[in-house]
Image (cartoon, helix red, strand yellow):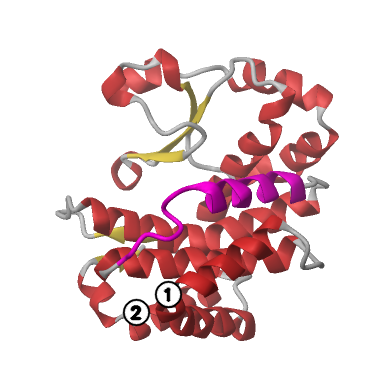
Amino acid sequence: MDYLISCSICEEKLLQGILGSSTEFKNFYETERSKIKSPLIWLQNDKLRQEDQISQGRLANLGELSTGYVAITVHNNPAELSDATTVAHELAHAIIREEGFPFIGPYPECRDSSVINLAFSLNNMIHDPLVIIKLLKSGFVLREEYENECLDAIRKNNIGNKYSGINSIVFTLFYVQQLLENELLFSDSENHCTKLIEKIEELYPANIAKGKQIFEFIRSNGFNSPDKVRQIYEKIFDIYPGIRDLTVIC
């Protein structure tokens, strides 16, 4: 932990350029940054030792329960205009945690990568749409970026693979996330996100019933408060009882 702190980047210098060049990022930063009360450190991923590197652009919780630190990795220092959406996205994840929204974690003794991926997918399914809402309020235009991500997913060979067990649940959660994000970002059907959803529904009919059950519950329940998100996770645990033995709501 001390090593990572020693590698931290000055936030003011890192963000000075995009604060001056992106109106959307400036709006977001001035409105939302003060909500993060926990110590936040910024890291340039390719400057770290290999064993300490984190997936690019991903919010990383560095011993959160014991130290209270969170960290965000960046590719460019100083951040460039093209980084504005990614940096705001990761800041928004940290803010969602600060606002008390629950998240899912594997039990501490768990080292099973499929369970860790399941927890990650449960978080993304709800937290990423919450992030989108925050960014849209600050004026970010996200349609093209998300269309490109969906087009990339369509082109990848893993759309069409067979999934079973935990991986099947993870894929169902991915489907639910696409439904939520599509509803937030698109008012028409002529987009790659809708095409991705249609492709999933065509190839994975066994996943669709439970996916739509979760989606409809989220729509009727709402997900704009920590209590509502906790209710969503409890509903998913009812649909997939085995998840209770693998993960915990934090």
Q: Is residue 214 above or below residue 159?
A: below
Quarter holding the N terminus? top left
Residue 190 shown left or right of residue 168 in the figure: right
The dot on residue 237 is: 2
Q: Mark 1 near mark 2, Cβ–Cβ under 8 Å?
A: yes
Q: Nearer the viewer, residue 158 or 32?
A: 158
Label 1 – label 2 distance at C-alpha: 6 Å
The dot on residue 245 is: none
Tell me where residue 152 appears, x and y as whole percent.
57, 45
Quarter holding the C terminus? bottom left
Toward which corner of the image does residue 210 lie, by quadrant? bottom left
Tell me where residue 187 appears, x and y as whole percent.
81, 67
Q: How many marks?
A: 2
The dot on residue 233 is: 1
Tell me where residue 14 appears, x and y as whole percent.
63, 19
Q: Is residue 145 above or below residue 40?
A: below
Residue displayed at 43% across by 61% down: 160
